[in-house]
Each structure stands twice: as structure tokens, then as C-alpha cells.
Amino acid sequence: MIRAFVAVVLDDGLRSAIAATIERLRPLGSSVVWVPPRNLHVTLQFLGDQSEERLAEAEAALADAAAGSAPLDVTFHGIGAFPGLERPRILWVGLAHGALEARRLQARVADALATRGFMKEERPWHPHLTIGRVPDERRWRREAGPPLRSALAQAATTTFGTQRVAEVALMRSDLSPAGVRYTVRRAVSLGTLLALVALTGAFAQGTPGVPPRTTLACPESHPVKTYVSSTSTRLYYTADNRLYAQVRPERCFASAAEAEAAGYRAGRGTRDMPVKPR
């Protein structure tokens, strides 16, 4: 039997930002079992111990749920506790921007799993990322002094970063002498069905997107810039990217979602750019 759960895996930048805060809190909270940075994730549903056959069913359910769920941007902000800081069992980082969309994604995953016989959790799902657990309440009351409480209060206003959630993962949990280790069994991309529908519609109308207005500018109605690099990589840039003004678009789209549906991916740095601006 394999212990499994469904989760959103963090990107390296966000993982490092949250891990740095954990390291600042660790010496102040010996009564807390802190989550190792490699294990940080957002749990969408816990599946418990499952056979290989049942995990294959779970993979199929995730594919169903992901196909109709669009990628989303989620901002991780603040630290809190369940049920509260006076008697905590779980310390967590919250989800701010994108929390509503994350709830919808989790509900879609839970529904898809339920159709294949996996039980839904009775408690409502609250968007969060667990960073620590308190196994002994009495020890917490005895050892969680003003320095830790002050540090937690300060962290409550911290924004750790924003992540583009483009996939969900079926995870397995393995216990070893070195501790618990989480690994990805299968990751499923979000929005495959939505992208197919959008792409089909776009190409039914001819070449997707619209032409640029000038060498460096797109029409206001289609501000997302795209081009194909010298290595045949299809890239797009949105106005909030620091390189946006330098990009010479080949086609323009109304949104990043439309560009992704047409087969482009987000450009992230100067090495993505095919030419330097004159």
C-alpha cells in the first residue's frame, strides 16, 4: 500500500522564501515540528493508504479534474494557526490572491475523486500551506514565549510571493529513518481541455491573435506580445514583465490564457529574447 495525497507543488523561489522564514522561527519554537523545505506543498486532498490499482484510478480522476480547470495565480501571504495561536495544532502560510480560484480547483479535484470512489473529507477545505505542527499543547504553552509570538505576529503581514499554478500532482509519502519524504508520482497539467477548445476556436478563425500596431507595440485590446525565437520556442510577454517594452511582437493576444492556448509559454528573462532592441 502507498500513502498518497493530491497537492500543488511549490516552485523553487517560493519554497526558498517560505523556508527562510521557517529557519528564522525554528530557534524560537522548539515545541513546533517544522516542515522540511523539500516537503512544503498545498494539500488538495489526502487519500491515505492506497493500492496501485486505486492510485491509477486517482490519476484518471486528476486528469478529468485538471482538463477543465484553468491555470491560476496564487499569492502566499501571512502566517496563522489552526485553530488559533493560543492552542495551535497547525501553523500555516495563507493563500491571499487566488484563494477563491484555489477553492474551485480543490472542489473540482474532490468531486472527480468522489466519482471514482474516494471519500471526500468532512471538514471544509481552507486554502493554506502547512509549515509546522504542534504535537504537545502543554509544551507549546510552556515554551512558546514572547519572542516566538512576536515573530509570528510580524510574519502575519509577510507576502512570500506569487506562483503560477499550472498543474496538480499525485504525491506519495514514504517514511524512512531520515524522516518523511514526499515525491511526485504523477503531475497533471491544468486546462488541457480549455486550451484545446480555445485553440480550436482560434485557428477556426484563421491565424490566432492579431498583428502588432507598431514594431514594439500591440493594440490596447490585445496587449500580450508573442514571438517565435531562433530556437523555435513560442514565447509571450505581459505588460507586468520588466522586458515587455523591449519585445518586438510577431502576434498580439488579448490575454495570457489566449497566448497559452495558442501554444506560447511565458518568457522570463533576457535569454528568451531573440534579438536585443535597437
Image (cartoon, rainbow, N blue to C red):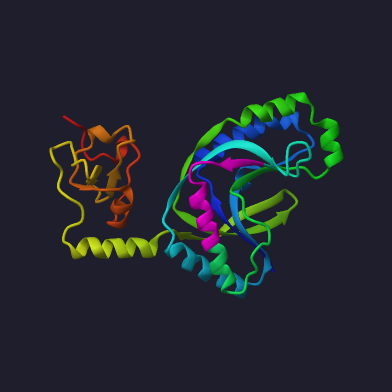
Camera-side residue of 119 and 247: 119
Camera-side residue of 133 and 275: 133
Range of magenta residues? 92-108
**Horizontal and vertical percent position of residue 257:** 33, 52
Residue at 55% across, 67% down? 111
Residue at 73% across, 54% down? 176
Residue 104 magenta-drawn? Answer: yes
Furthest residue in direction left, as rendered: 214
In the picture, which quadrant includes the C terminus?
Answer: top left
Q: Is residue 215 left or right of residue 127?
A: left
Camera-side residue of 118 and 13: 118
**Horizontal and vertical percent position of residue 43:** 60, 53
Residue at 87% across, 39% down? 138
Q: Residue 184, located in which quarter of the rendered image?
A: bottom right
In the picture, which quadrant includes the N terminus?
Answer: bottom right
**Horizontal and vertical percent position of residue 130:** 65, 45
Camera-side residue of 189 and 222: 222
> Does residue 202 lie above or below 277 as drawn?
below
Residue 124 magenta-drawn? Answer: no
Residue at 31% across, 65% down? 197
Q: Is residue 163 left or right of residue 179?
A: left
